[in-house]
Amino acid sequence: MRKRGGGLLIEVGVVVAIALFLIIIMPLLLTEFRLNLLGRFLSLAIVALGIDLIWGYTGLLSLGHGIFFGLGGYAIAMYLKLQVPTGELPDFMMLYGVTQLPAFWQPFYSFPLTIAFVVLIPGLLAGLLGYLVFRNRLKGVYFSILTQAGTIVFFNFFNGQQQLFNGTNGLIDFTTLFGATVSDAKTQFVFYILTVVFLAATYGICRWLTTGRFGRLLIAIRDDESRVRFSGYDPTDYKVLVFAVSGAIAGIAGAFYTIQSGSVSPRSMDIAFSIEMVIWVAVGGRATLIGAIVGTLLVNYARTFLSEQFAEIWLFFQGALFLIVVTVLPDGIVGWLRSQNISLFNRRQQIATYPTLEEDAEVQHERENIGN
């Protein structure tokens, strides 16, 4: 228990130190543009944590997290687009001849309701989708295909609603928030700080969920769901819960990304973007959490650097990176470090759900004391 408590304190201290470094030191080292870029990548790291929670620990490969990411982005964007003089409509609605604000836009006049919608709409949708899928015991590739099909539905819906969501152009040109100019450097720095804080908080929530009895149960569901069911647990409830939490996390990430990038469009719900999210986690390392953050930052910064330096062939470099990771580092960067007995945060390496007899402490005790 003392070792566990000491390791936890070390981990908390490291997370706080990294957060302070990002908030205090990085603004001194980066230009305004690069700092905004880092803020966007950190917001993407939040959604990567949610994917690692359901894929790395629970074994649910979602190829549709762009839905929840996009819904969170649209929620905050709708609030920002309503920051217009009383009686006026968002600019794109007037272009399409809309004369009255649609009823479902009305609640987004309220900032507290908007913040609630950023979390609840993606979370409840993920929970509902998860319940409909998991109660029928669909899993594996079938679950992945269903989530991917969901992205097609939502992409086409938002892409075709010019009067309601400005169609393929999405919601852009945010002006003010609480009287401050959204695009102003000081305002964007506040968004950057909030992104760092929420990333650290999300990491803490995911770490809490993946430790203790609940975390062991998630790993058991991932490794052998049938045996969990035979042990008296109903995996459906746990999978629905963790999928809903992951969807809510994606919604928060979408809101932070939208407010820092200045736009949201149906492209965030595209299939390719959802697959990219999975790649970030795979590169960093599944079931590590910290790997999801490392993979997101590494892949996105590599893409930015390569696209700037090699505009015509940078996609080949990106493809080569993914092939190397899959063939040489199947467990990701952090997974490889753990295989070399290099443990981040001084954490004990997790064992498999069913350890080998040589690693089982009870078997070793029997051998030493009974002689069998």
Image (spheres, rainbow, N blue to C red):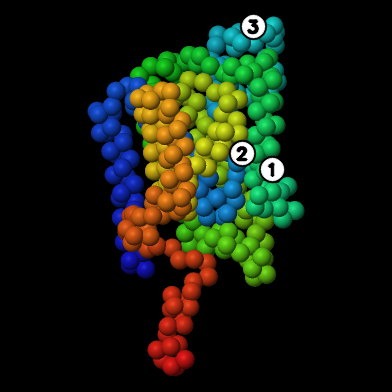
At mark 1, the secondary structure is helix
Q: Is residue 7 above or below residue 96?
A: below
Residue placed under numbered mark 2 in the picture: 64
Residue 293 image position (x, y, % from top left): 41, 43
Residue placed under numbered mark 3 in the picture: 95
Q: Residues within 10 Å of mark 2 (few under 14, many from 20)?
A: many
Pick the front one: 294 or 198 = 294
Disc 2 marks which amino acid?
Gly
Pick the front one: 357 or 244 = 357
Going 40% across and 89% down the picture, which residue do you hit?
Answer: 368
User: Viewed as shown, does residue 9 lie left or right of 107?
Assistant: left
Q: Answer with the quarter of the image where residue 70 lies.
A: top right
C-beta proximity under 8 Å, tags 3 and 1: no
Residue 245 image position (x, y, % from top left): 57, 46
Q: Answer with the quarter of the image where residue 96 lies.
A: top right
Q: Which of marks 3 and 1 is nearer the N terminus?
A: 3
Q: Earlier in the sequence, mark 2 or mark 1?
A: 2
Disc 3 marks which amino acid?
Leu
Q: How crowded is mark 1: few (under 14 residues within 10 Å), some or many (20 or more)?
A: some
Q: Is residue 158 above or below residue 248?
A: above
User: Viewed as shown, does residue 165 lie left or right of 111?
Assistant: right
**What is the tally of numbered marks visible in this picture?**
3
Residue placed under numbered mark 1 in the picture: 146
Query: Label 2 to label 1, Cα distance in Å?
Result: 8 Å
- In the rendered image, which quarter contains the N terminus? bottom left
Q: Answer with the quarter of the image where residue 271 lies.
A: top right
C-beta proximity under 8 Å, tags 2 and 1: yes
Residue 88 image position (x, y, % from top left): 61, 8
Q: Would you say residue 319 is visible in this rendering?
A: yes
Disc 1 marks which amino acid?
Leu
At mark 2, the secondary structure is loop
Q: Which of marks 3 and 2 is nearer the N terminus?
A: 2
